[in-house]
Image (cartoon, rainbow, N blue to C red):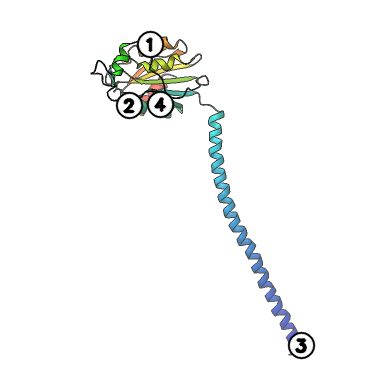
């Protein structure tokens, strides 16, 4: 028995040591696990950010080649323009008037309303309030507007006279209650003095994406 006591002590010590070492092994593993999770989360958010920053870098470096420009007083043409931009994966630019058009300004029954006076004066060029855009990197520009008194609103003429559309294909489109696009496309081409202008097309405000897609495909 006396001989057994040291032996049992050694065994107990040994078992104790194993217990400790497995605990010390576990702690770092737990710590590693946590750090792994947190570093994975960090990595994920870093990756997410880098995806975002990559895509914003991409949008800066790999410039899109199509732009959709629109003037819209009450939102109808803008909705159509947005659909076109989505189909074409195009950039979007809105011609915003320096002085917004009020409901009274848009009253076509009033001979003295701002819109009536502007449309009655072919030389009227209402000022644009939105920042200038660089158009030269685009190959194709859709330009949309509502029909006012059978023609393009004069502010769209302001826009086309302020840019050089050389080497760019220009595609006019409009919305209206019922009038066709009429001479608007030709007016814009004549005033712009640059760009290759295609025949324009009139759409109703409720035009479907399929109809727009068919039109876009017919231009190719
Ligand atoms: C001042 C003014 C004149 C208009 N003249 C015409 C017209 O001659 N023919 C027509 O069919 N619609 C005419 N409309 C209706 C607009 O073309 C139509 O509501 C258009 O879809 C509005 O587009 P927007 O919401 O983008 O401004 C006129 C609207 C306004 C405000």
If the image is split into quadrants, where does the N terminus sit? bottom right
At a point 45% along the width and 10% down the height, the residue shown is 193
| Mark before the other along the chain sequence, 2 or 4 | 2
> Label 1: which residue?
187
> Label 3: which residue?
3
Distance of label 1 from label 4 (alpha carbons): 22 Å
| Mark before the other along the chain sequence, 2 or 3 | 3
Instruction: Give coordinates of residue 101: x percent, y percent.
Output: 33, 23
Q: Which residue appears farthest toward the bottom when viewing the image?
A: 1
Instruction: Classify residue 96 by image quadrant.
Output: top left
Instruction: Give coordinates of residue 146: x percent, y percent.
Output: 33, 20
> Label 2: which residue?
76
Q: Is residue 107 above or below residue 34?
A: above
Q: Are marks 1 and 4 in contact (CB under 8 Å)?
A: no
Foreground disc of the pair 2, 4: 2
Q: Is residue 95 above or below residue 52?
A: above
């Amino acid at each position: 028995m006396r001989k057994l006591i040291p032996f049992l002590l050694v065994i107990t010590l040994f078992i104790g040591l194993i217990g400790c070492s497995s605990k010390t092994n576990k702690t770092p593993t737990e710590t590693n696990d946590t750090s792994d999770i947190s570093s994975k989360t960090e990595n994920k958010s870093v990756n997410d950010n880098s995806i975002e920053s990559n895509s914003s870098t991409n949008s800066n470096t790999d410039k899109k080649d199509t732009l959709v420009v629109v003037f819209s007083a009450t939102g109808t043409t803008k909705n159509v323009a947005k659909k076109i931009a989505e189909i074409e994966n195009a950039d979007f630019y809105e011609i915003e008037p320096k002085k917004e058009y009020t409901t009274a300004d848009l009253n076509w029954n009033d001979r003295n309303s701002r819109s009536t006076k502007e449309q009655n004066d072919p030389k009227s060029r209402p000022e644009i309030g939105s920042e200038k855009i660089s158009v030269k990197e685009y190959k194709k520009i859709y330009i949309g507007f509502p029909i006012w008194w059978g023609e393009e609103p004069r502010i769209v003429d302001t826009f086309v006279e302020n840019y050089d559309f050389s080497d760019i294909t220009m595609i006019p489109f409009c919305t209206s209650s019922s009038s066709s696009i009429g001479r608007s496309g030709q007016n814009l081409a004549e005033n712009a003095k640059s760009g290759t202008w295609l025949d324009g097309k009139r759409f109703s405000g409720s035009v479907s994406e399929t109809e727009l897609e068919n039109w876009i495909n017919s231009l190719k």
